[in-house]
Amino acid sequence: MRYFIYFSYCGTNYHGWQRQPNGVSVQEVMEEAMSLIMGETISLTAAGRTDAGVHAEMMTAHFDAQGPKSKEQGARSEEELRQLASRLNNYLPKDIAIDRIVPVTEEAHARFDAVQRTYEYRCVFAKNPFLQGLATRIPKNLDFEIMNEAAQVLLETQDFASFCKLHTDVKTTLCKVTRAEWKVTEDRAVFTITADRFLRNMVRAVVGTLLEVGRQRMSVEQFRAVIEKQHRTAAGQSAPAEGLYLTDIRYPENIFKGTSNNSTF
């Protein structure tokens, strides 16, 4: 049977989601915990992979597992899945939390079936020891109005090659962005971006380039020209990993067995 597992993690202590030969990853920790508790080898396929230091308030992954010993066939019951999630939470480290596990169709795929993802990039204006590793410090006097004007150009863009990490194996750099905006309060700023898919390093590259606009080192037209060049070297430096959060993933309703599971945490 195939299941989706919904979970969150603070990425500070991990070398990203994906297993790494020389560092501890979220995938490694979760697969080892699930394999031990479930008594079988569990392999997770996530909706995407976050880089070292990046966080996820919502991440999904799918896995295949045998039915419970009390049943010859069929998916685990809702109560059994709640108990499994609880046992995992008791075993996993404090910086990884399981929200829920739900049955899905046999063909459901956490990465390829996702129709929408949302990221937030969180910034603070003053040094804050309680947000160390959880937000990026930026100047308060940035021109956020012009940054939002530049961000709207992303909604008109199809090819995001200028914001894609070099030497990756992606087959296409086409994405559809449906939301891109900065919201500012007294002590912080948050950039939210929603799209059907994201490229490696895309959000951090977009944020880094928008910060150049906010510093008035780049105009909106120059930002547009960066996109038109379709090469990573045209854009600004990537913003630090610590401020980036994956916050939402959406799927078609027909891949779930039972009620909708597209609600956020």
Image: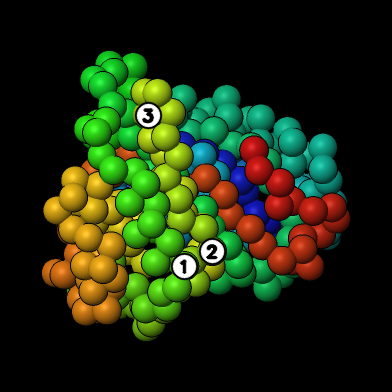
Which residue type does callout 1 highlight? Leu
Q: CA distance from mark 3 to mark 2?
A: 23 Å
Please, is residue 147 above or below residue 168 in the view? Answer: above
Quarter occupied by the C terminus? top right
Q: Residue at x 23, y 53 (%)?
A: 213
Which residue type does callout 3 highlight? Arg
Q: CA distance from mark 1 to mark 3?
A: 24 Å
Classed neighbour count for the residue bearing mark 2: other residues with Cα under 10 Å, few (<14), some (14–19), many (≥20): some
Asked whether disc 2 touches disc 1, contact meaning CB atoms under 8 Å apart, the reply is: yes
Q: Residue at x 21, y 79 (%)?
A: 229
Helix, strand or loop for disc 3: strand
- Seen in the image, is 46 located left or right of residue 109? left
Q: CA distance from mark 2 to mark 1?
A: 6 Å
The quadrant where residue 140 appears: top left
Measuring from the top left, give residue 48's x and y in whole percent. 45, 59
Asked whether disc 1 touches disc 3, contact meaning CB atoms under 8 Å apart, the reply is: no
Residue 155, label in figure:
1
**Number of marks:** 3
Helix, strand or loop for disc 2: strand
The quadrant where residue 97 appears: top right
Please, is residue 38 above or below residue 128 in the view? Answer: below
- Seen in the image, is 191 located left or right of residue 90? left
Measuring from the top left, give residue 252's x and y in whole percent. 71, 66
Q: Which residue is mark 2?
A: 178
Measuring from the top left, give residue 182's x and y in whole percent. 42, 45
Residues 125 and 71: in front is 125
Residue furthest bottom as drawn: 171
The quadrant where residue 73 appears: bottom right
Q: Which residue is mark 3?
A: 188
- Seen in the image, is 71 located left or right of residue 66? right
